[in-house]
Image: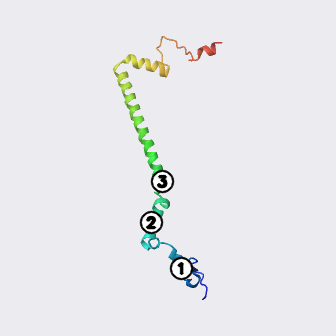
Amino acid sequence: MENNPDQIIDENLNPEDKVWVSPLSRIPRWLRNKFFIAAAMFMVIILFLDKNDLFTQADRGRQLKELLNSKQYFTEQIATEQGELDKMKSNPGILEKYAREKYLMKRDNEDLFIIPENYEEHKN
């Protein structure tokens, strides 16, 4: 018998019962099914090769979570600042105090002396 390179001999058989066996016959039949192969290729493309693959979706989910957290933080900051603005609009004394502390404003008949917070260190 001529030895075909696409076929091999099954070594588990008796020497007188040796039969030529295709290498594909060792693969289970359900793995050779064309629908299974097509579905497997589709899954590989969708999960790993697509522009919206699994890793990109995970990264986008992480970014969404970070953005939602920052949105919550800024919403709280806006509420806090809005409360301070309402206080400044209702009480001119608080507005004056804020302007003096933040922008170093003074009245016409006053002199302003700025003392650093770590004055004791600079004193020596």
- As helix, strand or loop, the secondary structure at mark 1 comes to loop
Give the CA separation, mark 2 to mark 1. 27 Å
Give the CA separation, mark 3 to mark 2. 17 Å
Question: Which image quadrant: the C terminus?
Answer: top right
**Disc 3 marks which amino acid?**
Thr
For the residue carrying disc 3, how many other residues have a C-alpha within 10 Å: few (<14), some (14-19), or many (20+)? some
Q: Residue at x 60, y 13 (%)?
A: 120
Residue mark closest to the camera, 2 vs 1: 1
Residue mark closest to the camera, 3 vs 2: 2
Give the CA separation, mark 3 to mark 1. 41 Å
Q: Is residue 49 above or below residue 5?
A: above
Residue 22: give its label: 1
For the residue carrying disc 2, how many other residues have a C-alpha within 10 Å: few (<14), some (14-19), or many (20+)? few
- As helix, strand or loop, the secondary structure at mark 3 comes to helix
Residue 56: give its label: 3
Quarter where residue 75 is shown:
top left
Instruction: Please name whichever residue, 2 or 102, is drawn nearer the observer in this view of the structure.
Output: 2
For the residue carrying disc 1, how many other residues have a C-alpha within 10 Å: few (<14), some (14-19), or many (20+)? some
Earlier residue among tags 3 and 2? 2
Residue 42: give its label: 2
